Image (tube, rainbow, N blue to C red):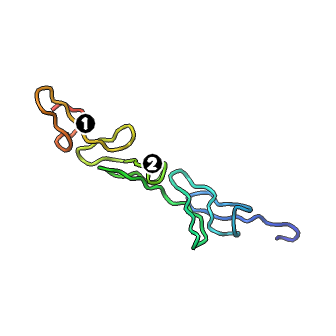
Amino acid sequence: TDGNFCIENKCYCTDGFGAVGSACPQDGALWCASCFRGFGLVQDLEQKERVCVQNSCRCMNGTASVGASCGQDKAMVCSECDPGFHLDANLTCQENTCSCPEGIAATGVNCTKHAAVN
């Protein structure tokens, strides 16, 4: 209290917005109400904290997206693909497949550009 007035609790938060009022368990505590884009809320009951942690996606045959380019933690979202793979419309890595009108089409690392004629 400040004289005859109560002062609302204000928590702080890195990578998000700190809780205020009754949502903040203790004035000055690390307690997030919501997170910036690319981060998700994680509550640590031992430390009595609720923090924002950077989202980390998963990716097969490439590099997983993190942060703002990963909208939901552990989602299958790639930022780039390994050689022989290309990024599809769903941001997953698919094996390259070339076309060959007069033979057998190359695939994977033997097809350096998806849908190319070899």
Please tell me how crowded label 2 is: few (under 14), some (14-19), or many (20+) other residues with Cα within 10 Å: some
SS at circle 2? helix
Q: Where does the C terminus fall, quadrant-wise?
A: top left
Q: Which mark is residue 114?
A: 1
Which residue corresponds to mark 2?
69
Label 1 near label 2: C-beta < 8 Å?
A: no
Q: Is residue 75 left or right of residue 16?
A: left
Residue at x 62%, y 67% (from the top left corner): 30
Q: Residue at x 53, y 56 (%)?
A: 40
Helix, strand or loop under label 1: loop
Going from N to C along the chain, the mark reached first, 2 or 1, is 2
Give how far across and how far down residue 28 sits, in percent: 67, 69
User: Where is 55 relative to 8, above or below?
Assistant: above
Q: Which mark is residue 90?
A: none
The amino acid pointed to by label 1 is His
Instruction: State the quadrant of the N terminus.
Output: bottom right
- What crowding class fits label 1: few (fewer than 14 Cα within 10 Å), some (14-19), or many (20 or more)? some
Residue type at mark 2? Ser
The percent position of residue 38, horizontal first and vertical second, equals: 50, 52
